[in-house]
Amino acid sequence: MPFTRTDQKAGLCWRFYYPTEFSMHPDYTAHAGQIVLCLRKCTPEEADGPDVDPSLEQMYHVRAHDGWEGDAYDSELGLIVSLSARERDDWPGLGDFPVTSGAPT
């Protein structure tokens, strides 16, 4: 079954959901659950995607607030439902999301 493709992710902020079972990339694990800015779609040279094979999921190049950059699958970029107080400080202008209680992420 082909993945749902969303071409409107670039230029927007998303919550990065990196699977916990993947531990080979500690920098990705360290940014799991954080907000990232989607910079652009990955090119076919960077990652195979639907341009190469329609059954493959699109990948995007993303940047976290601390400057880390990586590539994320479309399904790893989720809607931002709420913000911690720290995230609100780190990403001014994101919008009027509710602020979560508890420790900052």
Image (spheres, helix red, strand yellow):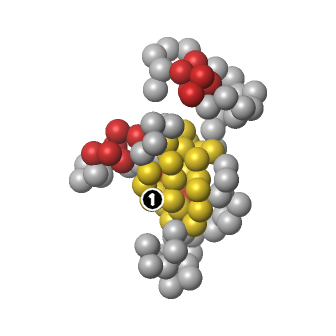
Picture quadrant where residue 84 is located? top right
Of residues 72 and 81, which is closer to you in this image?
72
* Whole-percent x, y for residue 40 in the image: 59, 62
Q: Is residue 101 left or right of residue 20?
A: right
Q: What residue is shown at x 44% (from left), y 73% (from top)?
A: 47
Q: Residue furthest right?
A: 96
Q: Is residue 23 left or right of residue 93?
A: left
* Residue type at tag 1: Asp
Q: Is residue 40 above or below residue 37?
A: below
Q: Is residue 101 left or right of residue 11?
A: left
* Whole-percent x, y for residue 82 in the image: 63, 29
- The answer to whether residue 89 is seen in the rendering is yes
Q: Residue furthest top?
A: 102
Of residues 21 and 46, which is closer to you in this image?
46
Q: What residue is shown at x 67% (from left), y 49% (from top)?
A: 12
Q: What residue is shown at x 46% (from left), y 26% (from top)?
A: 105
* Whole-percent x, y for residue 80 in the image: 63, 38
Q: Secondary structure at mark 1?
A: strand
* Whole-percent x, y for residue 20 in the image: 34, 45
- The answer to whether residue 55 is seen in the rendering is no
Residue that carries the numbered disc 1 in the rendered image:
71
Name the image quarter holding the N terminus.
bottom right
Q: Residue furthest front?
A: 67
Q: What residue is shown at x 46% (from left), y 42% (from top)?
A: 67
Q: Is residue 24 above or below residue 30?
A: below
Q: Is residue 91 left or right of residue 73?
A: right
